[in-house]
């Protein structure tokens, strides 16, 4: 569902608009209410963000998706350890001209960020620092988990980004790295597991995350780490 022109008030029932953790704190752990997590998927145009999110939310691969304009909004409900979880996936536009007016909405109250690059495009991998900077500029909290996904691994002969280079980069930021293919049906469960890993992390960190809100010193430490990634030795 495209939500380019949807007023932000419409989301206020499911996403706290002022703080990433506001939403989480609305729910008791034993409540029947789902825990709703907003996950944004960002990266260059054409890396496969739409296909990855469709694979996870719909189970299918889109052969010829249109370029995303603004944002496409998908969701999937899960039950993890008896807790109802709803993952709200924001598939953002990679093209600057299609994202300009929406950027503020992407980052507001986000619970997790997925950086996607295309393993057959070195340029898309080299853009990841810019996407990380954009997150920082929009004040995405230090406790918001980030992961990196290298997509299109089915195109083995066209690979331009090695696993070791990507792993080295991801390690320098302390981000988990996943390589997969939205297209390859054999990777369907792997795509699921990427999102499930995030869901588990969000669920299990919730009590700690709420506690850490008041811990200013650790927030400062994390910011430092994000701004100054350790040097890769590769
Ligand atoms: N071979 C292969 N092609 C893929 C894969 N994922 C996506 N594609 C193709 O890559 C093209 C771009 O996919 P999209 O999902 O629209 O890319 P996007 O990152 O959402 O692009 P924007 O909406 O412009 O930001 C399409 O032609 C897809 O069919 C994959 O895993 N393998």
Image: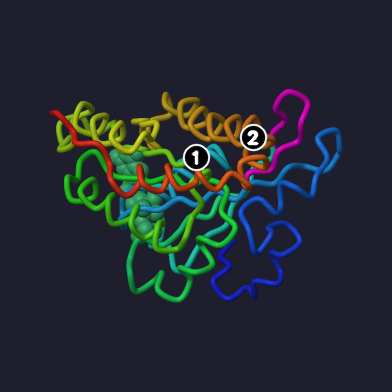
Q: Secondary structure at mark 2?
A: helix
Tell me the crowding category of disc 1: few under 14, some 14 to 19, or many 20 or more residues within 10 angstroms, Cα based: many
Residue under circle 1?
Answer: 55
> How far apart are the alpha carbons under marks 1 and 2?
31 Å
Residue 85 is inside the magenta segment: yes
- Inspect this view and state whether residue 64 appears: no
Instruction: Name the quadrant containing residue 156.
Output: top left
Percent position of residue 84, x then y:
76, 35
Query: Where 34 falls versus 42 (above or below)?
Result: above
Q: Which is nearer the eye, 197 or 179? A: 197
Report the side of 109 relative to 147 (left or right): right
Report the side of 111 relative to 152 (left or right): right
**The C terminus is located in which quarter?**
top left
**The N terminus is located in which quarter?**
bottom right
Numbered range of the magenta stretch: 78-87
Q: What residue is shown at x 37% (from left), y 30% (from top)? A: 178
Percent position of residue 130, x then y:
28, 56
Residue under circle 2?
Answer: 208
By secondary structure, the bulk of the magenta-drawn segment is best described as: strand
């Amino acid at each position: 569902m495209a939500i380019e022109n949807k007023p932000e008030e419409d989301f206020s029932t499911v996403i706290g608009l002022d703080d990433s953790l506001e939403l989480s704190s609305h729910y008791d752990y034993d409540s029947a209410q789902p825990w709703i997590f907003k996950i944004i998927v960002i990266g260059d145009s054409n890396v496969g963000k739409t296909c990855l999110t469709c694979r996870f939310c719909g189970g299918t691969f889109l052969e010829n998706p249109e370029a995303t304009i603004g944002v496409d909004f998908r969701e999937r409900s899960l039950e993890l350890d008896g807790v109802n979880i709803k993952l709200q996936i924001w598939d953002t536009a990679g093209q600057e001209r299609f994202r300009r007016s929406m950027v503020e909405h992407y980052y507001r109250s986000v619970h997790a960020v997925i950086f996607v690059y295309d393993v057959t495009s070195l340029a898309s991998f080299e853009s990841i620092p810019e996407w990380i900077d954009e997150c920082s500029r929009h004040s995405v909290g230090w406790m918001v988990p980030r992961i990196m996904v290298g997509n299109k691994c089915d195109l083995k002969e066209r690979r331009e980004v090695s696993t070791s280079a990507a792993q080295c980069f991801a390690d320098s930021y302390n981000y988990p790295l996943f390589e997969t293919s939205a297209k390859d049906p054999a990777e369907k469960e792997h795509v699921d597991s990427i999102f499930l890993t995030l869901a588990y992390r969000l669920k299990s960190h919730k009590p700690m995350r709420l506690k850490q809100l008041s811990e200013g010193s650790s927030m400062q430490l994390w910011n430092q780490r994000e701004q100054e990634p350790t040097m890769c030795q590769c």
